[in-house]
Amino acid sequence: LISEEQVNVYYSNNFHDAVFLKSAKIYGNNHYDDLTLSTGQIYELAGGSTQTINPDGAINGNGSCMDFLTISSMTTGNAAYIEKSTGTVMLSYVVLQDIYAIGGGAFSATNSADLGNNVGWTFMPSVPRNLYWVGGGGDWNDAAHWALTSGGVGGECIPTPFDNVFFNQNAGFVLPGEQVNVNVLIAFCQDIDWTGVLNSPEFYSPYVNKLY
């Protein structure tokens, strides 16, 4: 299975190699030899369902510094399960919520965020930061707009759920109404502060966006 469009997967299936290039909602109890999830996409698993990775199989599911991969249950508080009986599942730059890791394998998530009710995972989160927007209007996932100091040099990874975000007088907005384009499906930050910002920038997203 190679899915190039957003899909819903129904019933219970046995997949040799399932590749999801776009977001997906997955129902039923499915088995995979290999499961590939894609950067910047959202994967929702039915609460109570189990996605089983066969003993010699793998999950290939890594986000990136500039765009996370999100895996969650469809129903907040009602966990979905990912099962692997042996070996390891090693993910990076992922955001997890209501996902239980079961079956005896070792599950880890590096530079990743635990949004709650995740069991069986070893999280290695990134260090919380204060991030300052610089360079005027532009895209949320453009590293050039994120700096560690007010008015500083950009180049930082986009905000995680643990980072504080500041738009202030040094953000570089020189014309009224310049846009901060939240061009990711889900954006994250801990707190957002607009104190001192100049020229009334517009906070815009082309998506029905979730900002956590």
Image (cartoon, rainbow, N blue to C red):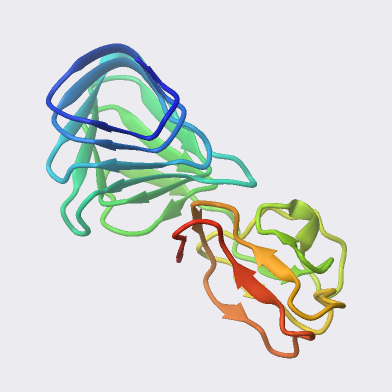
178 or 16: which is nearer to us? 178
Does residue 14 show up? yes
In which quadrant of the rendered image does the C terminus lie? Answer: bottom left
Q: Position of residue 8 (x, y in %)?
A: 26, 34
Report the residue at 75% width, 90% height from top: 196
23 relative to 174, above or below = above
53 or 193: which is nearer to us? 193
Q: Is residue 131 left or right of residue 125?
A: right
Q: In this view, does 6 lie to the left or right of 196?
A: left
Q: Position of residue 124 (x, y in %)?
A: 49, 48
Q: Is residue 131 left or right of residue 11?
A: right
In which quadrant of the rendered image does the N terminus lie? Answer: top left
Q: Where is residue 89 in the image (x, y as percent from the top left)?
A: 39, 28
Does residue 103 show up? no
Q: Residue 194: which quarter of the image?
A: bottom right
Q: Residue 177: which quarter of the image?
A: bottom right
Report the residue at 60% width, 59% height from top: 127
Report the residue at 34% width, 31% height from top: 106
Q: Where is residue 12 in the image (x, y as percent from the top left)?
A: 13, 23
Report the residue at 21% width, 19% height from top: 31
